[in-house]
Amino acid sequence: MLVVMTVLGIETSCDETAASVVVDGRRLLSNVVASSMDLHAKYGGVVPEIAARSHIESIMPVVQQALNEAFPALTSTNSVSDGVLAIAERRAKQWAEVDAIAVTYGAGLGGSLLVGVLTARTLAIVYDKPLYAINHVEAHLYANFLTETALPSYVLPSVQPVFPSIGLIVSGGHSQLVHLRNHFDYTLLGQTNDDAIGEAFDKVAKIIGLPYPGGPSVSRKALDGNPQAFSLPKARMAGKYDFSFSGLKTAVLRLAQQQIGEDFTFPSSGLADRLNESQKADIAASFQRVAVETVVDKTVLAYEEYGPRSVIIGGGVASSPELRRQLSQRLESRMGSPILYTAPKLCTDNGAMIATLGCFKALHGQPTVDPYSLDIAPNLSM
């Protein structure tokens, strides 16, 4: 008998409060994200206390909006004519359509994770739903398994990835390379030993005076620059598939100081005012080229060693046009087929990737967790 699994996913690992409803790990019914990024921009990065407070304010409206968009025929108008009882009945019918709840329990900011986990635990108890604990890093890859949606402005892959596969997770907090033999059967090949690639983008953006978040800002500025203008180093690591970006970040700092005729004692906070726009663009382009080459080099190496049937890219940096360009240029001829990328909206943190992984956990008989005792794991890794 065909089993249809509908999962509500909740994601609050950092500064996005997100919820989504996904069917069978393939069809996206809703995807709602409330970001507190504007609150953090003036600080140049995420402030954990501000993020947690924003989650508390947003979590239940976001969950309800996700249900409303997923099941529009059962959505209350909340008008006076509906009445309290009618609204309650419609919401009960919405929850009857949900088979399970999935929630990020790690990795991430402790306070942010706590809001999502406590919300999911409460909803699982109140509505008597199975609860799945989701690894945020692993879930980034599962955004690529969504192939169907009626939602506007989502361009999804035409087919799901096939195993075995090489998975590259690149975001503000994570840079990892994984060999996936099947669902829930994988080996972590390598990861960053210091900064994640997205964090390096943020720090370089700050050095040259570009706004937070750094990834999109650097990418836009790089369009006006020469990626070959400066020679920047790539870290040589003991682990064949490990990454390091702290040395590259420092090299950019020294380069910027050199460009304005100052030595290493000149404070980084004063660089942006002294650099002209051409210098900023060339630094952005040169840094982006080398940072992206660093992860692409290792991905190509893993592809040549393991000979996978597909390559999966996840995380906020996966939406980078330069990353997609380099990967396509260097891998598609070897693969004999194009790499399929998910919609940019599904690369950053979202509830859809959590719900999708929850679907696969349910469909493959993975264990549920106790809603009375699930705890957060801020330092969780793959």
Image: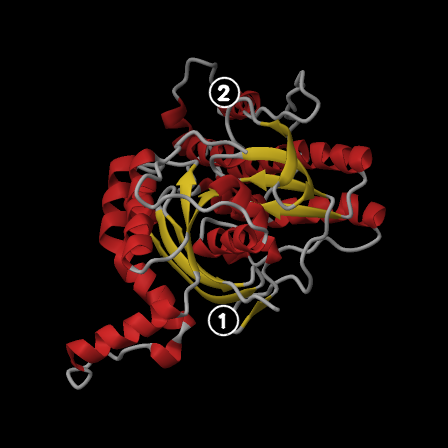
Q: Amino acid at mark 2?
A: Gly
Q: Quadrant of residue 159?
A: bottom right
Give the Cα separation between the discs numbered 1 and 2.
52 Å
- Residue behind mark 2: 261
For the residue pair 205 and 323, the one nearer the viewer reads as 323
Q: Secondary structure at mark 1?
A: loop
- Taking the spot 38% from the left edge, 81% from the top edge, the residue there is 73
Place of residue 324 in the rendered image (x, y in percent of width and height, measured from the top left):
66, 49
For the residue pair 267 and 99, the one nearer the viewer reads as 99
Closer mark to the observer between disc 1 and disc 2: 1
Place of residue 132 in the rendered image (x, y in percent of width and height, measured from the top left):
44, 48
Q: Are marks 1 and 2 in contact (CB under 8 Å)?
A: no
Q: Secondary structure at mark 2?
A: loop
Residue 221 visible somewhere in the drawing = no
Badge 1 local density, few (<14 within 10 Å), some, or many (20+)? few
- Residue behind mark 1: 151
For the residue pair 60 and 131, the one nearer the viewer reads as 131
Quadrant containing the C terminus in the rendered view: top right
Q: Is residue 15 above or below residue 176?
A: below
- Mark closer to the chain start, 1 or 2: 1
The reply, left or right, for residue 228 in relation to residue 99 is right
Q: Quadrant of residue 170?
A: top right
Place of residue 151 in the rendered image (x, y in percent of width and height, measured from the top left):
49, 71
